[in-house]
Amino acid sequence: MYDSNSNQDLKSTLKPRHVQMMALGGVIGMGLFVGSSVVIQAAGPAAILSFLITGILIILVMRMLGELATASPVTGSFYAYARYAFKDSPFLSRLAGFMTGWMYWYFWVIVIALEAIVGAKLLAYWMPDLPQWIVSLVLLMLLTATNLFSVRSFGEFEFWFSSIKVAAITVFIFLCSIYLFGLWPNHQASGFGELLNHGGFMPNGWGPVLSGAVAATAFYFGAEIVTIAAAETKNPEESVAKATQSVITRVLIFYVCSIFLVVCIVPWNSTAIATPYVSALQVLNIPYVADIMNSVILVAVLSCLNSGVYAASRMLFALTKNGDAPRSLTKLSKNGVPIRAILFSTLFGYFSILASYFSPDGVFPFLVESYGTVALFVYIIIAFSQIRLRRHLERVAPERLKVRMWCFPYLSYLAIIGMLCIFAAMAFLPNLQKAFWFGIASAVIMFCIFMIRDYFELLKLRHRYPKLDTLIITKNHKI
């Protein structure tokens, strides 16, 4: 498939422990600690099913990505795979690559702004007098500087951030399990506690469960960063294979198990569920729980912000390789860091932060409502790319398939059907229709930009080769 020599300008300084911890902590963010409350309030204890349904789809997508990333670890990961998967049609190849790369970049630059804003709100718990928009900008500047220094500095920060998150959720699961088993001081075992009270396991029916599964899609997004990091990792095949295979453990333990414990301890219809993990620990009468969890959530936010800067800049760097982004953004530092790609990505983050404070009812809501749908688009394209590339690899280089998708192609098609069902459900669920249409609008805007860019590129080439009656723009593909 792609030649790994195309990545020689990026330094392979990420260590296996960096990649492994990125994989473990990649899905632990605001979605788990705070966003999960929205799903629980709507679906009740059956929110467990919401996270399980979406979690299974994420497991399948990550397995597909693991197969491709171990076979060909390249800059841009699934952006490059989308381009190559449709190489038989130059137009589709360019379109799939352009849409995948820019939609993924778009997702992360919005996340960068969101995490900086949330980080400022968390710091206001200790420093209420500081203007939050200034704190947001400072947080973004600090983690931009971390990414600018070297990829290894990013890896170290992410390693420790993720270590804290993983340790915190592990301790939470351990303490809550002890409580439910009746081993906690002054507490007797109560079976499933609040799980079946207040209307039963599924008090509001299947509708909120399915809408919760849609909302949970964006919470899981981030696990795929390890495949992007493959191009800057020592022994990428081994590192990425281990990281992607750990997704099953992460999903089942960090999300499904912890949500199960929360709804067993805290009544789903109480006001306390708005802060699910804090409220669960308060039931256990753990002192300083608010300070502890606020600190952990802040670390999770900074981790997502750090990862967002990395993911957005590397995807933008990959886009420049095929002319899908200005080649001036390709410039690397002596440490092999794409400086201009980082600065350009964070520039959009600064704009989004300012929009959140100066246009809270205009530009910013559009960005927030649209980014989750955009993430779903990316996953669907990944699945189609994997099916085409798997068949190509089986013909030309089967020895590269060190990690294989289970039950291919049936589970690959199942993942696509599942994601299309989620996408279709958004159009009919009242609380998700706005996000659906904003996401469609974002995709249409990107498609129009692609067509305009392609049109002018065609005119440029026709001007250069005036004797050609028909000109098809093609890109070189290395086999």
Image (tube, helix red, strand yellow):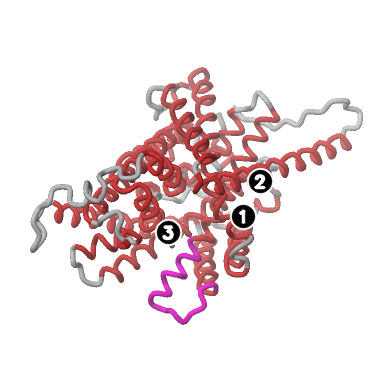
Q: Is residue 381 left or right of residue 247?
A: right
- Give the structural element (helix, strand or loop) at label 3: helix
Residue sticking out furthest to the right: 467
Which residue was labeled with disc 2? 320
- Give the structural element (helix, strand or loop) at label 1: helix
Ranked by sequence position, the earlier of labels 1 and 3 is 3
Residue 303's label in the rendered image is 3
Residue in the picture at 42% in, 46% down: 216
Q: Height in image: 90 above or below 18?
A: above
Residue sticking out furthest to the bottom: 129
Q: Amino acid at mark 2?
A: Thr
Which residue was labeled with disc 1? 341
Is residue 351 found inside the magenta-colored segment of the image?
A: no
Residue 61: image quadrant is: top left
Q: Height in image: 324 above or below 413?
A: below
The answer for how far apart the CA atoms under marks 1 and 3 are is 19 Å
Residue 294: image quadrant is: bottom left
Indicate the quadrant containing the N terminus: top left, top right, bottom left or bottom right.
top right
Residue in the picture at 34% in, 67% down: 295
- Tell me whether the residue at label 2 lies in contact with that at label 1, contact meaning CB atoms closer than 8 angstroms: yes
Which residues are drawn in magenta?
115-133
Given residues 275 and 476, the one toward you in this image is 275
